[in-house]
Amino acid sequence: MLHKRESIRNELLDEVFASSDLSISMPKYRIPETEHLARHAYQVVSDELMMDGNSRQNLATFCQTWLEPEVRQLMNETLDKNMVDKDEYPQTAAIEARCVHMLADLWNSPDAVNTLGTSTTGSSEAAMLGGMSLLWNWRARRRAAGRPAERPNLITGPVQVCWHKFARYWDVELREIPMEGERLLMTPDEVLKRVDENTIGVVPTLGVTFTGGFEPVQAVSEALDKLEADAGLDIPIHVDGASGGFLAPFTAPDIVWDFRLPRVKSINTSGHKFGLAPLGVGWVVWRDAADLPDDLIFDVNYLGGDMPTFALNFSRPGGQIVAQYYNFLRLGREGYRKVHQSCYDTAMLLAAEIGKLEHFEIINDGSPQAGIPAVSWKLKENVEHPFTLFDLADRLRVRGWQVPAYTLPADREDLAVQRILVRVGFSRDEASLLMDDYRAAIAHFDRHPITVPMTEEEAGSFHH
Ligand SMILES: *Cc1c(COP(=O)(O)O)cnc(C)c1O
């Protein structure tokens, strides 16, 4: 008995790293047989996560890595709230609905009060929902006209992988406009070349993943207006505003890309990107209730009350939605404009600095009219360089920076680019530290020129 008491006392007083739990290696691929002290298990898990790298130095991601203490507090307070349970958590549901109206209003919906939309886990789920409504509406139009509805196609510029998923999961032919020479975005002419009666819609991206550029939604919409007048084909637009939906309204309000264009039927955005909410929230909003097919909405009664649901997921945390609403109140339009403008200013400064270095040519200069607060660049062509962009990306990792290098999609797979995403939390001071390290990396390769360049696979890029 005494022995047992003694051992419990020892367990409680053990120094964590000298404890019996931490002086052995925990099993990795099967659940351990016995319990461990919470303090010990926490230390093991927390220490392993240390190896993940520092998210604030990850200049590859579009997602939020800096959050106000109040956001963390709200996330804590809402850990137990399931947003799907709208009967039990009616205020979370009301807050979600308010966010939808606020976004519809931000995007110049003709009727922001009666608009339909929903929160999602991110732009990927939102894109699926937008794509599905295009597909269902097209099928209904075809059937009503007594025409076959078997071979749908969707036209996009160079898109994020979520649209490849949409096309494959729903068996839609993806007509992705390839990049060509210096043209790295969708153009109206390229859209018109691919449109036919089986086109369910056109998806321009406001903030293309690969370069950061905005696609010309208005020009595409006008070209489709003319097509309708000439040939009677009425092709709807869904805008992938994953990044741009939360940028252009504040920092480039003159760009007409949203519900001001009657052809734009739905828009998706990522709350956790430039919406400044924590990871795990996106939004999709329809122009008009009639643009969201009834057939896609389910009613469930088993949570108490009758709940319409249109989403791929069911249970989901409510905190991200609450934090999104907090941001709307906290920042207002003015705050969003200030936060984003300061990111653009930093991006343009970086573009100017990188452009000054002899090796590079800027593709996206981070200006609010051209795209998102990102800088992308390539090596000057027809010049010898003592490194590749993959070598440079790898060298920067020595100081913890993640500045991805990657090759572009079809038909510019030959062209490698590097890209920096400037997000809130990446200060002017950090930008100048990064530039010091960038110049030091180049100086390193000047002293030690690369003889066998690193491949894209070895550099392990991730940019989606
Ligand atoms: C990030 C992104 C997506 C996917 O969004 P998630 O919120 O990560 O699911 C889709 N499209 C574009 C243009 C993006 O930038």
Image: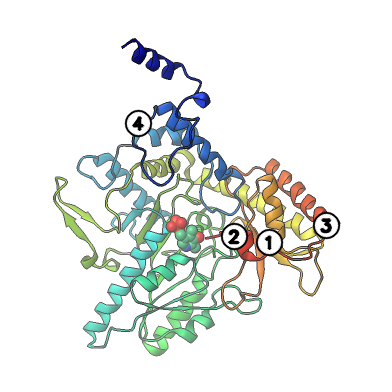
Q: CA distance from mark 4 to mark 3?
A: 52 Å
Mark 1, Cα crowd under 10 Å, few <14 / some 14-19 / many 20+, is many
Disc 4 designates what residue? Answer: 35
Find numbered disc 1 in the image and state the secondary structure of the residue it sits on: helix
Badge 4 crowding class, 10 Å Cα cut-off, few under 14, some 14 to 19, many 20 or more, is few
**Image position of 104 with respect to 408: above or below:** above
Query: Amino acid under label 2?
Result: Ser
Mark 2 lies on a secondary structure that is loop
- Please name the amino acid that badge 4 sits on: Glu
Q: Say what amino acid the circle numbered 3 marks.
A: His
Instruction: Give residue 50's position: percent from left, percent from top.
Output: 55, 39
Where residue 55 sits: x, y (%)? 56, 45
Label whose residue precedes the other's in the sequence (4 or 1): 4
Label 2 vs label 3, nearer the camera: 3
Q: Which mark is residue 428?
A: none
Q: Assign the N terminus to one quadrant of the image.
A: top left
CB contact under 8 Å: marks 2 and 1 = yes
Query: Distance from label 4 to label 1 (Cα)?
Result: 45 Å
Mark toward the viewer: 1 or 3:
3
Q: Earlier in the sequence, mark 1 or mark 3?
A: 1
